Every structure is written in C-alpha cells, then in structure tokens.
Image (spheres, helix red, strand yellow):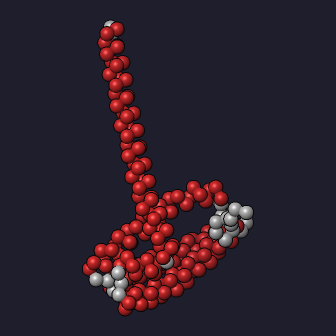
Amino acid sequence: MDTKTKKSLLIITIILLIVINVSALATIYYNSKIKTKKLAEMNNLKEEVQIRGMHRFIRDELKLSDEQFQQFKEITKTNMIIAHGIALELNEKRLEMMNEIAKVNPNMKTLDNIASDIGSLHYELKKTTISHFLKLKEICNDDQLESLQKIFMQMIRNQDRNKLGRSSREGERGRNRDGRPRRNN
C-alpha cells in the first residue's frame, strides 16, 4: 500500500472512531438525564406518600369517596394481617434453613423441603398481593382504575429499582444473623 492510501485509511478510521465516541457519549448523557428525571419523580412520589401517609395518599390520588375509603382501609388491613403472617413464616423458614446449613452434616432432604416451603410461601404472598389489588380494583370507578394502574406501575418500578440497588448496599453493610440489615453504629 502506498502512503496516500494508508493516510486515507487512517483518516477514515479516526473519523469513524470520533463518530462512535460522540454517539456513545450522547447516549450516556441522554440516558443519565432520563434516569435522573425518573428517579426524581419516584423520590417525589415516595416523599409525598411518607408525608401524607399511604392511606391519605391513595384516597387523594384516586379521589375516593368516604365509603370507598372505608372499604379501602378494610381491604388493606385484612391484606396486611395475612401478608404479615406469611412474612413471619418466611423468616422462620429462612432461619430454619440457615440452622440446617450451619450443621456439620446438613441434611439435603431437609434443605430441599425447606426450600420448597419457602417457594410455596412466596407463592402465597404473591397470591395475597394479587387478591388485594383485585379487591381494590372492585371498589374503583373507571377514572379511579386508570389512576390506580399508574400507582401500581410506579410501585412495581420502585420495587424493581430497590431490588437492583439493594445487593450493592448489602455488600457494603452486610446483614445480621436474623437477615436484617446491619446498623452502622
């Protein structure tokens, strides 16, 4: 190859690399702005819920009548009692699993049964959540259903974000033997 051809190829390669770098930087900048905006929206929603309380937030967002609000509180109370019971059972099973794993010769059959029980409890918890949301839908009119759907989607996105972010924070702080996050003293 002659020098002119080499120079031309070198210039084309440099231009191509510049275009790729500019595109990559533009994409990163654009995504960071969108994520920042969505995160700010979620933080505002979370803050609003904390300030006003979940019940009042739902009542105001859905514009529930007094009768609907009483039904909402009863549905939520019943769901919380059931979900709390399942969560306690899950914690007991996790502790049982950890105790079995800690043994010198853990029994794999026992661990398999515990894992199956934990899976069943997760399934029951999800069914309880689904039932709760379906009961909430029953008390809403069409306009309220649309608002409720938006709230559900925000909650799901927030849960997903928390699950993704949790692993990195847990690595830094760790958990105590009961499975709760360690406190920084």
- In the rendered image, residue 116, in percent from the top left (x then y), is placed at 53, 74
Residue 12 versus residue 179 in the image, above or below: above
Residue 180 versus residue 53 in the image, above or below: above
Residue 14 versus residue 92 in the image, above or below: above
- In the rendered image, residue 165, in percent from the top left (x then y), is placed at 52, 58
| Image quadrant where residue 60 sits | bottom left
**Which residue appears at 37% of the width and 40% of the height?**
26
| Residue 34 visible in the shown view | yes
**Which residue appears at 48% of the width and 87% of the height?**
77
Could you tell whether 22 is left or right of 105 in the image? left
- In the rendered image, residue 104, in percent from the top left (x then y), is placed at 73, 66
Q: How many marks?
A: 0
| Image quadrant where residue 16 sits | top left
User: In which quadrant is the C terminus drawn?
Assistant: bottom right
**Which residue appears at 47% of the width and 88% of the height?**
78
User: In which quadrant is the N terminus drawn?
Assistant: top left
- In the rendered image, residue 180, in percent from the top left (x then y), is placed at 64, 69
Observer-nearest of 55 and 88: 55
| Residue 119 visible in the shown view | no
Residue found at the very far top of the displayed protein: 2
Observer-nearest of 101 and 59: 59
